[in-house]
Image (cartoon, helix red, strand yellow):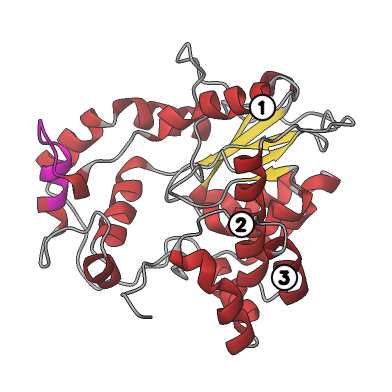
C-alpha cells in the first residue's frame, strides 16, 4: 500500500511487478501520505494499510475506493525473473540469482520446498486481502489492459493523472532470452499460483470492476508519527526528484529531520537532480514505456 488518499476518497494498493512505480509518480501529488521505498512499505498489503490508517486516526479503509493492478501470473513470474537477473542486482546486493540461471531453472527454484532467497515471491492475491483473508478490492486493473483501465479511472478528478497511462507500453522486455516454459513446468507453476490464476481470470470475467459514481472524499487529517512523517517526506522528495521537480524535491528534503538516518539512494537524490538536468523528462518517458528506470538500484561504496 503506497498511496493513502482518504481526503480524495481512495486507496491504491501497490502490487509488485505491475507498473507500480509509474502509478506512484502519477498519483503522489494527490496523496495524504506516500510510502515509496521498497524497504519500508512500497508494497503494503491491504491489511497492513488498513492497520496503518487506523493508527493514524483515519477512516476505515473499507469506506474508501480501493484499487490495484494484477498481472497474468506466469508473465508476472517472468518479470520477477528479469528483475532478479539484472546485472546491478548482482553487483550491489539484493536477492540476485546466480549468473547464467535460465528461466526454467528459476521457476524450479520458485517451486522448491525451501526456495533460495532469489526465488522467494509472494502471491499477488496476498496484497489485496484483509486480516480475515477476504479479498477487499473494489477495482482491479490488469497490466495488459492498463491503458484502457487507466482511462476508466481517470474520469475521477482525483485520478485524472492516470490518463497518462494511454502511453504506457506493456511487457517491454530487456532480454532476448526465450522465456517460454515446457508444458509440464508451466502446469506446475500455475498450480502453485492457483489463487493468482483464479483471481486474474475472475477479473477478466468482470469481477472486482466496480466503479462508484463519485469517490467518497471527505475532509481528513492523518496523525502520522515522526517516523512516518519522515518516510512520507523521503518518498515525496524522491518522486519529485525523479520527475525533475527540483523545487518540490528541496521542499520535501527540508522536512526530513536531520537526525533521521537516510539510505544512500535518498542522500543522493538532490545531487542527481542538480547534476543531471532534464533527467525527469527522460525518466517519465521511460516509465510510460514500461521500462525499469532503477530508481532504487544500490550504489557501490564511494559512488
Disc on the earlier residue, 3 or 2: 2
Can residue 235 be seen in this snapshot?
Answer: yes
Q: Residue at x 33, y 50 (%)?
A: 75
Separation of residues labelled 1 and 3 (CA atoms): 27 Å
User: Mark 2: few, some, or many residues within 10 Å (few <14, many ≥20)?
Assistant: many
Is residue 199 toward the left or the right of residue 185 in the image? Answer: right
Q: Which residue is mark 2?
A: 234
Is residue 108 toward the left or the right of residue 3 in the image? Answer: left
Q: Residue at x 70, y 52 (%)?
A: 27
Residue 103, labelled with which disc?
Answer: none
Asked if the residue under mark 3 is in contact with the one under mark 1, i.e. CB atoms within 8 Å, the reply is: no
Q: Which residue is mark 3?
A: 250
| SS for dot 1 | helix
Quarter of the image with the C terminus in it: bottom left
Q: Quadrant of residue 147?
A: bottom right
Question: x, y percentage for residue 199?
Answer: 44, 28
Point out the stretch of residues depicted in magenta. 106-116
Residue 53, labelled with which disc?
Answer: 1
Q: Residue extending furthest front?
A: 259
Can residue 166 be seen in this snapshot?
Answer: no
Closer-to-camera residue (244/80): 244
- Is residue 109 part of the magenta span, yes or no? yes
Question: x, y percentage for residue 264?
Answer: 44, 66
| SS for dot 2 | helix
Disc on the earlier residue, 1 or 3: 1
Separation of residues labelled 2 and 1 (CA atoms): 19 Å
Closer-to-camera residue (147/277): 277
Q: Residue at x 51, y 59 (%)?
A: 262
Say which of marks 2 and 1 sits in front: 2
Q: Residue extending furthest top?
A: 132
Closer-to-camera residue (130/222): 222
Asked if the residue under mark 2 is in contact with the one under mark 3, i.e. CB atoms within 8 Å, the reply is: no
Amino acid at each position: 500500500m503506497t498511496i493513502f488518499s482518504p481526503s480524495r476518497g481512495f486507496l491504491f494498493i501497490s502490487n509488485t511487478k505491475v507498473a507500480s512505480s509509474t502509478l506512484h509518480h502519477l498519483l503522489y501529488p494527490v496523496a495524504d501520505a506516500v510510502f515509496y521505498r521498497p524497504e519500508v512499505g512500497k508494497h503494503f498489503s491491504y491489511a497492513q494499510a488498513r492497520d496503518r490508517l487506523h493508527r493514524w486516526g483515519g477512516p476505515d479503509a473499507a469506506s474508501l475506493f480501493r484499487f490495484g493492478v494484477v498481472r497474468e501470473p506466469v508473465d508476472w513470474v517472468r518479470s520477477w525473473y528479469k528483475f532478479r537477473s539484472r546485472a546491478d542486482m548482482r553487483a550491489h546486493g539484493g536477492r540476485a540469482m546466480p549468473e547464467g540461471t535460465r528461466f526454467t531453472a528459476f521457476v524450479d527454484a520458485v517451486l522448491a520446498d525451501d526456495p533460495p532467497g532469489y526465488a522467494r515471491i509472494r502471491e499477488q492475491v496476498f496484497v489485496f486481502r484483509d486480516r480475515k483473508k477476504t479479498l477487499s478490492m473494489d477495482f482491479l486493473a490488469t497490466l495488459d489492459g492498463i491503458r484502457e483501465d487507466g482511462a476508466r479511472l481517470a474520469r475521477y478528478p482525483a485520478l485524472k493523472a492516470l490518463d497518462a497511462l494511454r502511453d504506457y507500453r506493456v511487457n517491454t522486455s530487456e532480454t532476448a532470452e526465450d522465456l517460454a516454459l515446457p508444458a509440464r513446468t508451466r502446469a506446475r507453476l500455475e498450480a502453485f499460483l492457483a489463487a493468482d490464476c483464479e483471481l486474474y481470470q475472475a477479473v477478466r470475467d468482470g469481477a472486482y470492476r466496480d466503479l462508484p459514481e463519485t469517490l467518497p472524499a471527505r475532509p481528513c487529517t492523518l496523525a502520522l508519527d515522526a517516523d512516518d512523517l519522515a518516510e512520507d517526506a523521503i518518498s515525496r522528495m524522491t518522486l519529485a526528484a525523479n520527475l525533475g521537480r527540483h523545487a518540490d524535491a528541496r521542499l520535501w528534503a527540508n522536512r526530513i529531520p536531520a537526525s533521521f538516518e537516510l539510505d544512500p539512494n535518498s542522500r543522493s537524490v538532490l545531487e542527481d537532480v542538480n547534476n543531471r538536468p532534464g533527467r525527469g523528462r527522460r525518466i517519465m518517458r521511460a516509465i510510460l514505456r514500461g521500462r525499469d528506470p532503477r530508481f532504487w538500484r544500490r550504489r557501490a561504496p564511494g559512488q
